[in-house]
Image: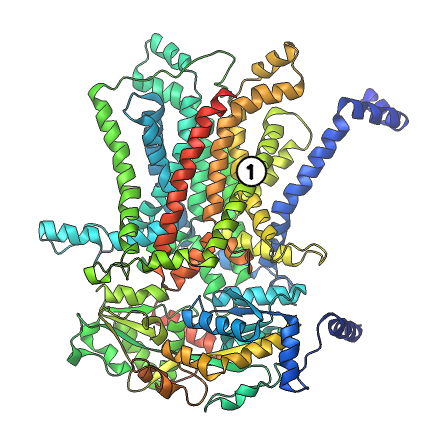
């Protein structure tokens, strides 16, 4: 106690020299850098959220006279909203559990077994994630419609039955459509975690007499916990925020979830009820915050470092003839989730009307109209530019924040982590309103509103949580021994960062970059509110065309996007294989 | 204090923006518009080809660039509200429904007087330009039937025919509870045909959808034999498919689309010129051929043969802003 007082008294006298000392030690620049990062993240997350908090407490949106009250929150605390919550959580939980089981199965098949053509299968399994949901929704509306869906027509023709085999307009239809995205999303996390694991740990378990299943459950699965819990949580939250699937397949079956309720209260009321919509969003945010706390509690105090200084190569399990079954499982997933809907789109794009397949309606007109549409080309350019710059900026920011929060003991690191996580907890469409209000009410000298910068900033904010999670999971798996060893052998901090941390975390960075890039390519809810003339992006153009009944043109653009996705993924995988593995 | 601020704002606005030439001759408006060089329109046209054709013709005729932002009604309303409240005046004019303009006037100071436009004198009865709005076109609605599933003798001829028991569970409809064409039809038919009509229709258990532009195709594919309310123009590009739009004998409920000038528009003269251009015979003819109802004299009869019945349809309505909350509440009650 005495020494503490003495330090407090002595500090002012030592201040100039300690500041210099701090500068020499790099503490001051470090603190300034952390402060700058906190400010940047606060602008990306707290600023739009504060606008929304205002909206949830004020009877009118910003800029309109009104009064403060809690009527929005009172509306949330009602029985119909409780049913909404139960619906939303139930659907998301079920789809996350099923897709996690599938992702672990596929991850294990690809990373740890001798299944044939694993490289190709990996690319095929991840493809559904990159297809814009509006396209698959449209295609599944044609395939699984109970009255005239192709699957049901074929079923009736084969069996002579009057009943439908599948009905996409149902709870299972909503979950099925969500599964097609969450399975590859989770797979991307899980497969890397399988690869990053030292097989010596499993071998030790086996040598101690444990069975294959026991080893998988208690060693393999347990070591993958950070990646699995993070992925589960991200996927579950994404499920809570999912909009397209319940809108397309839930609304016709009178299935309402929180996002469609928010959408209806903003878009389908006589006067948009922002107070209820934002209050409902803050209620979800509270739920998500509890989930994050649960994640922290689950992972607290446990070590999951599986990448050490020891060299190893993953051991493959010989499945014998069963390898063809695992091969067939992967192919079946690809066929059902990609080939069927894309096949339907290809078919539709060559006919005058989507769904009417007559010889006299065959046409190339839709391709001609897309190729000659300058707005489409401008949207392509904007989208790719925003994707490239946005994904790179987001991942760089995410990598820095994750590094500080997981590998240092710097003051303010937890604030950074929380700030970076915040945007993930709000549904995109509500956060977009926060951005719209936020950018519009900035001082007039700061011209972000109505420019392409508004989209870029929103994309970085929306992508940062996932970038931080991906990089945090990667850093957590790296042993501190590696860094210490490098420093002991005379490497500088920068050399250690470059040759150890960046080199080992690079594959995760690449995965995060791909997730962010395609997240930007597909992003709709923020784009639709923030775009302006000249800053249109593809998702908005697709939505507008869809709303205008141009399903055939949407198919053509969707197929062009798919082609680009294939090329892009191929180039990216080639680059990773050639350069990153040797970094 | 407030007065001083208003005076200051007016003074600054007069310095910042080119003076509107509304009191001078139309030639000076045209000259001022060309000097402004561009006009920004907010619309709900959803990229309709006739809308784009009118804009293209305007650009070609005057050399003035048109930047059009196509938005859904609710997005458009929120964008205008936010921009006006934040003092960012990006849009010049908007084409929205009469009720939305009334709502904007009720909720804030977002629009300004348009001034006279020469072609407004050609408006046909009952359409009239006011100080703050100019009619652009009319969007009427009818009944869509699948011609393979509905025999000619069974086709509904009136709105009441929808309540025939044979159509129970077979009607696809735009959701009548939220804001949109479904609720517009609900409100107008409630007023014109009486409360019993909507009560009986609710007993028919129509299946709701919100996918306005694709619902006609669902009917064409045979998912449902009937769809209401079918906006005429949205079926005009379905030639070759087994569908037919029926104009009921009582008439067609409609949404009136009008121009309004946004407050502190940066290009007020170009906006006025564009509004005037929309009322040209050729512009209105493009709309009439797209099965919209033109608002100027002498166009409906010049429309293509297949478009004439729609361009001359008997109208029912309009829906009124003050009745909207009660109608939405009633629809929610009937269709719980």
Q: Residues within 10 Å of mark 1 (few under 14, many from 20)?
A: many
Q: Is residue B292 left or right of residue B225?
A: right
Toward the right, the furthest residue is A13
The chain containing the residue under callout 1 comes to: A
Looking at the image, residue A352 lies above or below residue A211: below
Q: Residue at x 52, y 50 (%)?
A: A382
Name the quadrant containing residue B313: bottom left
Q: Is residue A93 visible?
A: no
On the image, the x and y values in percent for residue A107 come to: 36, 28
Residue B15 in view: yes
**Closest to the observer, A375 or B327:** A375
Image quadrant containing the N terminus of chain A: top right
Residue B169 rendering spot, x and y as whole percentages: 23, 68
Tell me which residue sits at (33%, 84%) in the image: B308
- In the figure, residue B236 lies in which quadrant? bottom left
Q: Which residue is mark 1?
A: A392
Q: Name the side, left or right, on which B175 lies relative to B150.
A: right
Asked if A302 appears above or below A561 in the picture, the reply is above
Query: Horizontally, is B191 left or right of B172 in the view?
Result: right
Closer to us: B37 or A7:
B37
The image shows residue B304 at horizontal and vertical percentages of: 33, 81
Name the outermost residue toward the top: A207
Residue at (18% x, 52% y) in the render: A152
Please, which residue is most extreme toward the left here?
A: A160
Q: Is residue A464 left or right of residue A159?
A: right
Residue A380 place in picture, x, y as percent: 47, 50
Q: Is residue A89 above or below residue B109?
A: above
A16 or B141: which is nearer to us? B141
């Amino acid at each position: 106690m005495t020494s503490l007082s003495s330090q407090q008294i002595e500090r002012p006298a030592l201040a100039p020299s300690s500041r210099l000392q701090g500068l020499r030690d790099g503490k001051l620049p470090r603190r300034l850098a952390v402060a700058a990062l906190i400010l940047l993240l606060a602008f990306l997350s707290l600023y739009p959220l504060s606008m929304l908090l205002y909206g949830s407490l004020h009877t009118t949106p910003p800029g309109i006279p009104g009064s403060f009250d809690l009527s929005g929150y009172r509306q949330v605390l009602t029985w119909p909203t409780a049913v909404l919550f139960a619906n939303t959580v139930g659907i998301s939980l079920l789809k996350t559990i099923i897709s996690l089981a599938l992702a672990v199965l596929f991850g294990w098949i690809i990373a740890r077994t001798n299944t044939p053509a694993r490289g190709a299968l990996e690319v095929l399994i991840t493809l559904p994630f990159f297809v814009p949901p509006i396209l698959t929704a449209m295609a599944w509306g044609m395939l699984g419609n109970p009255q005239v869906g192709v699957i049901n027509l074929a079923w009736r023709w084969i069996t002579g039955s009057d009943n439908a085999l599948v009905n996409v307009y149902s709870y299972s239809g909503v979950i099925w459509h969500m599964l097609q995205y969450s399975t590859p999303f989770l797979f991307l996390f899980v497969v890397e975690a399988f690869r990053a694991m030292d097989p010596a740990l499993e071998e030790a378990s086996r040598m101690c007499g444990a069975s294959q299943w026991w080893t998988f459950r208690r060693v393999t699965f347990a070591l993958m916990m950070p990646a699995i819990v993070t992925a589960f949580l991200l996927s579950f939250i994404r499920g809570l925020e999912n909009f397209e699937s319940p809108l397309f397949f839930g609304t016709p079956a009178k299935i309402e979830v929180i996002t469609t309720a928010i959408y209806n209260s903003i878009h389908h009321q006589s006067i948009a009820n922002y107070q209820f919509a934002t209050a409902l969003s803050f209620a979800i945010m509270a739920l998500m915050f509890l989930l994050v706390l649960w994640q922290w509690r689950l992972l607290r105090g446990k070590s999951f470092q599986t990448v050490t200084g020891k060299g190893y190569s993953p051991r493959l399990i010989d499945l014998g003839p069963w390898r063809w079954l695992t091969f067939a499982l992967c192919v079946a997933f690809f066929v059902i989730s990609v080939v069927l809907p894309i096949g339907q789109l290809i078919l539709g794009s060559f006919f005058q009307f989507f769904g009417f397949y007559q010889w006299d309606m065959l046409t190339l007109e839709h391709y001609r109209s897309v190729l000659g549409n300058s707005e489409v080309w401008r949207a392509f350019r904007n989208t790719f530019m925003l994707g490239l710059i946005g994904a790179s900026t987001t991942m760089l920011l995410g990598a820095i924040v994750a590094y500080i929060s997981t590998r240092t003991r710097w003051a303010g690191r937890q604030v950074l982590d929380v700030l970076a996580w915040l945007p993930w907890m709000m549904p995109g469409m509500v956060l977009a309103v926060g951005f719209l209000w936020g950018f519009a009410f900035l001082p007039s000298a700061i011209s972000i509103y109505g420019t392409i910068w508004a989209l870029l900033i929103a994309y970085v904010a929306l992508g940062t949580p996932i970038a931080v999670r991906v990089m945090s999971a990667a850093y957590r798996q790296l042993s501190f021994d590696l860094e210490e060893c490098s420093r002991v052998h005379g490497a500088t901090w920068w050399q250690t960062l470059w040759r150890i941390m960046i080199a080992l975390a690079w594959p995760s960075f690449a995965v995060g970059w791909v997730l962010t890039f395609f997240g930007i390519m597909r992003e709709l809810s923020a784009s639709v509110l923030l775009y302006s003339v000249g800053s249109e992006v593809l998702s908005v153009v697709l939505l507008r065309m869809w709303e205008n009944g141009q399903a055939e043109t949407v198919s053509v653009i969707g197929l062009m996007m798919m082609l680009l996705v294939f090329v892009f993924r191929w180039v990216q995988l080639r680059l990773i294989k050639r350069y990153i593995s040797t970094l | 204090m407030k007065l001083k601020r208003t005076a200051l704002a007016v003074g600054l606005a007069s310095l910042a923006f080119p003076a509107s030439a509304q009191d001078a001759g139309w030639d000076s408006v045209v000259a001022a518009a060309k000097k402004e060089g561009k006009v920004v329109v907010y619309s709900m046209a959803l990229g309709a080809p006739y809308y784009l054709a009118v804009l293209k013709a305007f650009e070609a005729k005057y050399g003035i660039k048109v930047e059009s932002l196509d938005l859904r009604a609710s997005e458009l309303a929120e964008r205008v509200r936010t921009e006006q409240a934040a003092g960012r005046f990006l849009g010049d004019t908007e084409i929205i429904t009469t009720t939305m303009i009334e709502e904007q006037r009720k909720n804030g100071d977002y629009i300004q007087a348009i001034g006279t436009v020469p072609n407004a004198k050609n408006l046909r009865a009952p359409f009239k330009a006011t100080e703050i709005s100019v009619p652009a076109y009319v969007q009427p609605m009818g009944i869509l039937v699948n011609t393979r599933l509905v025999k000619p003798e069974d086709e509904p001829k009136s709105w009441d025919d929808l309540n025939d028991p044979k159509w129970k569970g077979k009607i696809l409809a735009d959701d009548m509870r939220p804001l949109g064409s479904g609720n517009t039809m609900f409100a107008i038919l409630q007023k014109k045909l009486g409360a019993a009509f909507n009560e009986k229709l609710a007993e028919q258990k129509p299946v709701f959808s919100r996918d306005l532009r694709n619902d006609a195709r669902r009917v064409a594919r045979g998912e449902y034999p009937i769809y209401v309310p079918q906006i005429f123009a949205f079926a005009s590009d379905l030639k070759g498919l087994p569908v037919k739009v029926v104009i009921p004998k009582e008439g067609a409920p409609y949404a009136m689309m009008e121009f309004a000038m946004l407050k502190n528009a940066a290009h007020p003269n170009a906006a006025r010129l564009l509004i005037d251009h929309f009322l040209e015979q050729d512009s209105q003819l493009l709309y009439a051929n797209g099965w919209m109802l033109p608002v100027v004299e002498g166009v409906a009869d010049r429309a293509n043969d297949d478009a004439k019945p729609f361009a001359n349809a008997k109208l029912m309505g309009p829906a009124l802003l003050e009745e909207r909350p009660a109608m939405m509440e009633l629809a929610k009650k009937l269709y719980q």
